[in-house]
Image (cartoon, rainbow, N blue to C red):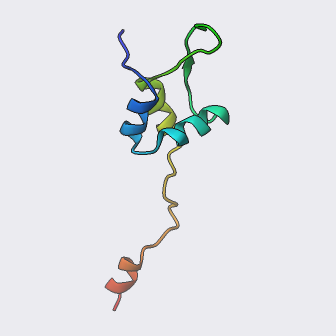
Amino acid sequence: MSDEVMDKKELAQMLRISERTIERWISECRIPYVRLPKRGAWSEIRFLKSNILAWLKRNEVKPSKYFRSNKDDDEDD
């Protein structure tokens, strides 16, 4: 099974956030990533699209069943 691999720039574009936010989430271990083998003093980081989509789904905030919008209140009038 093939999975799309993205770099920081591609992920930032997909999520419509800055690369700096991606870097911060990496340093805080808040986002799943793959560290490639070291090349010299540093190593690059990549992201698997399927892991990112699963991470987004796990972090989805679902509306409360007790929430009632103002639109519902207006209909009573």
Q: Residue furthest front?
A: 40
As drawn, the residue found furthest toward the bottom would be: 77
- Residue at image coords 36%, 19%: 4
Q: Nearer the viewer, residue 50 or 71?
A: 50
Q: Would you identify the image quadrant in which residue 23 lies?
A: top right
Q: Position of residue 25 (x, y in %)?
A: 60, 37
Task: Residue 68: give x, y in percent of width and height.
Answer: 46, 72
- Residue 12, above or below 60: above
Horizontally, is 31 left or right of 8 in the view?
right
Does 60 sit above or below residue 45? below
User: Where is 51 relative to 35, above or below?
Assistant: below
Give the tally of numbered discs.
0
Residue 1 relative to residue 25: left or right: left
Q: Position of residue 76 (x, y in %)?
A: 35, 87
Q: Nearer the viewer, residue 75 or 63?
A: 63
Instruction: Residue 32 in the image: state x and y as whole percent.
Output: 56, 27
Q: Quadrant of the N terminus?
A: top left
Q: Quadrant of the C terminus?
A: bottom left
